[in-house]
Image (tube, rainbow, N blue to C red):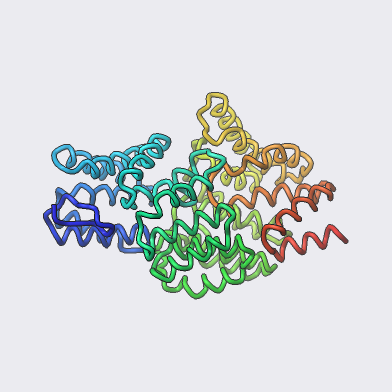
Amino acid sequence: MSTLDNRGLGLSTSSDLAAEHYRQGVDLLLSAWPGAAEALDAAIAADPDFALAYAARARLHAVRTEIASAKSKIGKAEELLARHGTERERSHVQVLSLAINGQAAKALERALEHADRWPRDILILSLPLGAFGLFAFSGMADHDQARVDLCERHAASFEANDWWFLTYLGWAHAENGNVAHGRKITERGYELRIENANAAHALSHAMYEGGASEDAERLISGWLPRYDRTGILHGHIAWHSALAALERDDPAHALRIYADYVQPSVSKGMPVNIVSDTASFLWRLQAYGHTVPVQLWAQASSYSDSYFQKPGFAFADVHMAVIAAAVGNKAAVEERVQALANLVQTSALSAGPVVPAICRAALSFAEENYADCVRILEPMAGEVVRIGGSGAQREMIEDMLLLSYMRSGDVAKARLLLDRRLHRRSSPRDTRWQAGLAA
């Protein structure tokens, strides 16, 4: 074995060309950058027995929700490693296989064990990280802290200028509340590799969480044109810019961004991003007192009909309920709530009872029964983190509670929540709401 990956780990291929395509493909995959599929396919063509190239291709299929192809590719990798390969490669493929075949809890356990032995195996270390990583979707209430702990535990294994590690270290700190520190680290990663959608995404999050929404808008407007529309995070990063426009009370600009980049007919992102981005943007637009064209909710509902019909994916369940409630499909919300409650009863829903509670609260909010929304959501407010995603994504649920306080006349609780938010970061929107309460 003479070939190495980009972090110095050995590769079981005798083809220098295959190894070079693999290194390029993994970097593109971990940058969420177009071209990863072509590079990994070229690695396989150069060495049809290169197991890790099949494994990385399987991971890319899984990211794009191409599950049948992902299972086929990871199966091929397992078959090849049964004949040859190192202990590290066998563990690498086993972790990916668990994740691709829906065994998330076991995949997380094995990924952490793998990282303890081979921390520089970043395709595996990446699995627990991110807003949609194994930690975020584990149902844990402390997954933000868990990401920080994991990154810090292995920080000594990485060079000071490792663009990939800096991006995730910064993201982890910013999401866990250490925003200024996280932003500084993320900026270093971004500067080292600007053609990295994960870095642009993480940096826009850090800016938003730090109350620097205008910085985020400038970042995205300058960076997005270099990112091809086929990039998996293109629509979602634009969504962040739309949120920033809403923050400064410019709904017309926010709607233009939505129409040009975010809505289902134009976005090439993952279904979970498209469903959650459309649901949360339209909900915010409407909840903040702006008019939502009826056809936009209809389009979001039509798109969502093809995805996440089986309850049990907490993050998706919440956004599916928001869409159904917005279009008046009360039966769909109630059916999902019942199915989720059954999963809670059998301990089959890792995020627990907060998921059906948020779905019920979304229906009450849509029906303008704000006191009922408060009754349902208030006891669960501390558990919302269990659904996963990012702080910016989960803020919709906090907004739902805050606006329900305001509209049900509970001014004291609304003020308390606003004061807490404004203490954390500046917000023109929250400042406007606070002034409204004072008036």
Q: Is residue 314 above or below residue 285?
A: above
What quarter of the picture does the C terminus occupy? bottom right
Relative horizontal placement of residue 43, taking residue 228 as reference (left or right) = left
Residue at (16, 49) in percent of width and height: 12
Residue 252: image location, x then y, percent: 65, 69
Residue at (44, 53) in percent of width and height: 270
Q: Is residue 195 above or below residue 6?
A: below
Residue extending farthest top: 346
Total number of numbered discs in the rendering: 0
Residue 37: image location, x then y, percent: 29, 58
Residue extending farthest front: 156
Residue at (70, 55) in percent of width and height: 421
Q: Is residue 169 above or below residue 341?
A: below
Task: Kindly tell me whether residue 238 is visible in this rendering.
Answer: no
Task: Kindly tell me whether residue 237 is visible in this rendering.
Answer: yes
Q: Quadrant of residue 356?
A: top right
Residue at (55, 42) in percent of width and height: 142
Residue 234: image location, x then y, percent: 46, 63
362 or 8: nearer the viewer: 8
Residue 174: image location, x then y, percent: 55, 57
Residue extending farthest right: 439
Residue extending farthest left: 14
Relative horizontal placement of residue 281, taking residue 192 as reference (left or right) = right
